[in-house]
Amino acid sequence: MKILRDNMSIKKICVVVTARPSYSRIKTALEAIKNHPNLELQLVVAGSALLGRYGNAIDIIEQDGFTVVEKVFMVLEGENPTSMAKTTGLGVMELANVFYKLQPDAVITIADRFETIATSIAASYQNIPLIHIQGGEVTGNIDEKVRHANTKLADLHLVASEDARNRVIKMGEKPEMVFNTGCPSIDLADEIKKNPKLNFNPIEKYGGVGENIIWKDGYLVVMQHPVTTEYDSAKADVLKTLEAINELNIPTFWFWPNVDAGSDGTSSGIRTFRELTKPKNIHFFKNMEPNDFLKLLVNSKCLIGNSSVGIRECSYLGVPTVNIGTRQNRRQRGSNVLDVIYDKELIKKAIENRISSNNIHQESIYGDGKSGERIAEVLANTALSFHKTIAY
């Protein structure tokens, strides 16, 4: 029998975090669910979020005070399209058992990483209401297919922008089940906007590898991931960025890629360049706590690479961003972003352009800093059902 509070039954909300970036995309919503009197958080950590070589996100999650009820090891070696498919299949099998055991009232799947479809399938096939965070966006690669598939499996949609809400409705979802809550990662950015001081030494706190760079007079940040539909060029792509950064000779903090098809190529490119060139201006990290990472960003000269953080949080914070390649194609962006192809000289010119630009503004495309609270209220006050009919 469920306990009643405020004349409402407690809803058990199971959230599955499968990778390092997914945690920052959901952290404030986790806090709001945990603290809501009519919700019970069941936090499951899976995939690369459990692996040391991708930054041990599980350690940060537990340090932040969250109780992890289940851990799901599901990542297969290979970092190619076949291993992605097999990892997803293993995830379906393992998560199906987890949901059967936990008996949640609803399951949340986050955004668009390839393995998130495992969460959606395991919940949907067991008639558990599925909630999708950050549907309706477009990028032009395999992530977009996964995101839209999650949308069609989901029963409740918590999107990050009005543009995304309109797109989900056009996909046939009922308007009353599509809520523009904004992105929880903007909540973290809003905290940093109020207190942006970089109050720690990144190298002393996080270690990493590479030169002990002199960064206090200004630095760059690089976060470049492979594109799953272009995985065979990952090594060549990252080498072009490495060459550009090395020749600019500006102190740079460089972050390790996500686990995706091609990440072995990206990692190999970084290691090869590091061993042969021994760059004096680059220091490499695997991971950082979300708030520390945003402090590092907001105090930087520019973010370079192809991470969505340049499109989302950096837009809100007004951080200059050079977006390289196709990974973020068609995603709504702000004045902070300059797009460029994989070409060493063009990348250098784009970075110099962003550093010197006076036309970069803080923009609230993906939220206003209150997304986590909105998400918890929607979950508490919306009737959840696993059966839906297509809206026309």
Image (spheres, rainbow, N blue to C red):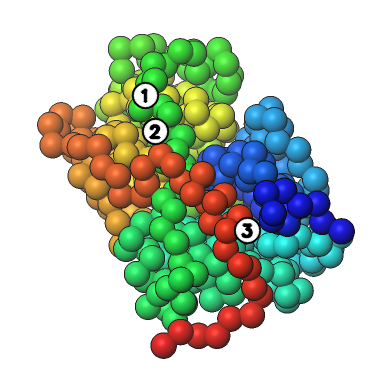
* Crowd around label 3: few <14 · some 14–19 · many ≥20 (10 Å): many
Type of the residue with mark 1:
Lys
Q: Is residue 179 visible?
A: yes
Secondary element type, mark 1: helix
Name the residue that disc number 2 marks.
190
Looking at the picture, how far across and down is residue 277, in whole percent?
43, 28
Looking at the picture, how far across and down is residue 72, in whole percent?
78, 52
Residue sitting at x 50%, y 25%: 292
Of pointers 2 and 3, the one earlier in the residue sequence: 3
* Crowd around label 1: few <14 · some 14–19 · many ≥20 (10 Å): few
Do callouts 2 and 1 mark residues in contact (Cβ within 8 Å)?
yes
Q: Is residue 257 visible?
A: no
Looking at the picture, how far across and down is residue 125, in whole percent?
73, 76
Name the residue that disc number 1 marks.
194
Name the residue that disc number 3 marks.
108
Q: CA distance from mark 2 to mark 3?
A: 23 Å
Looking at the picture, how far across and down is residue 206, in whole percent?
58, 20
- As displayed, is residue 242 above or below residue 204? below
Quadrant for the C terminus in the image: bottom left
Type of the residue with mark 2:
Asp
- As displayed, is residue 333 above or below residue 257? below
Residue sitting at x 42%, y 16%: 198
Residue sitting at x 41%, y 27%: 192
